[in-house]
Image (tube, rainbow, N blue to C red):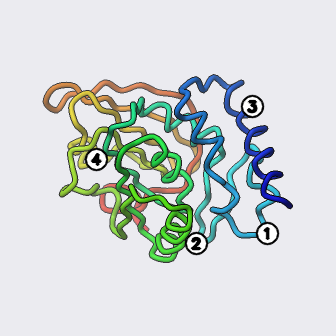
Amino acid sequence: MKLNDYSNKRLKMVETQIIPRGIKDVRVINALKKVPRHLFLDDALWPQAYEDYPAPIGEKQTISQPYIVALMTELLQLKGDEKVLEIGTGSGYQTAVLAEIAEQVYSIERIPLLAKRARKTLDDLKYTNIVITISDGTLGWREHSPFDGIIVTAAAPVVPKTLLAQLKPGSRLVIPVGEEFVQDLIVYTRKDGDSYIEENYGGCRFVKLIGEQGWRN
């Protein structure tokens, strides 16, 4: 398949899966039009890269459905000058979408092989505003906190208090919370001090967030 074929698939993905479902943020829409999702997958999966479902990336992990990537990114309400923390680098696709909008992205991955692959893909695509580390994402990244937004790409049984504490006042944490096989997508907005507004954006399904303040491995 030629490169322009993938560009056409990417545009069709946005026009049929993203915009009709209510994504309105122009920055998010443009990021999904630009980031080559197929390059974050094994070559054999490239023909399916822009379809309306998650895809495996190895190590029992997945790359999220395009709409979910768009929704979670839009819920952060980024303007372009933010410092964002991502928990779960995975393939690096969500990381790249964030990097198209935010000024700086810090991303934590638990699995070394995935972190290495993601770093190579992001380097090949010339992203210079992404820092990746291998660590327990449930503990956040204290030395770079507080953050203008935090996004968690795996499901927690309860929201990690450490992540809430690393939010700037007025900023948002987007995270799936619930049982092992079904969760709700929750947004926590930090008010002054340690009070938070909680909003539920409906059912979703993610792999488990493993860590000290998540699921046990």
Residue designated by label 1 = 44
Please give left or right for residue 217 compared with residue 162 in the image. Answer: right
Instruction: Give me the C-alpha separation between circle 3 and circle 4.
Output: 34 Å
Instruction: Give me the C-alpha separation between circle 2 and circle 1.
Output: 17 Å
Q: Residue at x 42, y 34 (%)?
A: 76
Q: Helix or strand or loop: what does disc 4 sit on? A: helix
Q: Helix or strand or loop: what does disc 2 sit on? A: loop
Q: Quadrant of residue 144?
A: bottom left
Amino acid type, callout 1: Ala
Nearer to us of marks 2 and 3 is 3
Nearer to us of marks 2 and 1 is 1
Residue designated by label 4 = 163
Residue 59 is tagged as 2
Mark positioned earlier in the residue sequence (2 or 3):
3
Instruction: Give me the C-alpha separation between circle 4 and circle 2.
Output: 25 Å
Mark positioned earlier in the residue sequence (4 or 2):
2
Q: Residues within 10 Å of mark 3 (few under 14, many from 20)?
A: some
Give how far across and how far down residue 140 sits, in percent: 28, 55
Q: Helix or strand or loop: what does disc 3 sit on? A: helix
Residue 15 is tagged as 3
> Is residue 160 visible in this depiction of the protein?
yes
Instruction: Give me the C-alpha separation between circle 1 and circle 4.
Output: 36 Å
Instruction: Give me the C-alpha separation between circle 2 and circle 3.
Output: 31 Å
Amino acid type, callout 3: Glu
In the picture, the quarter occupied by the N terminus is: bottom right
Q: Residues within 10 Å of mark 1 (few under 14, many from 20)?
A: few
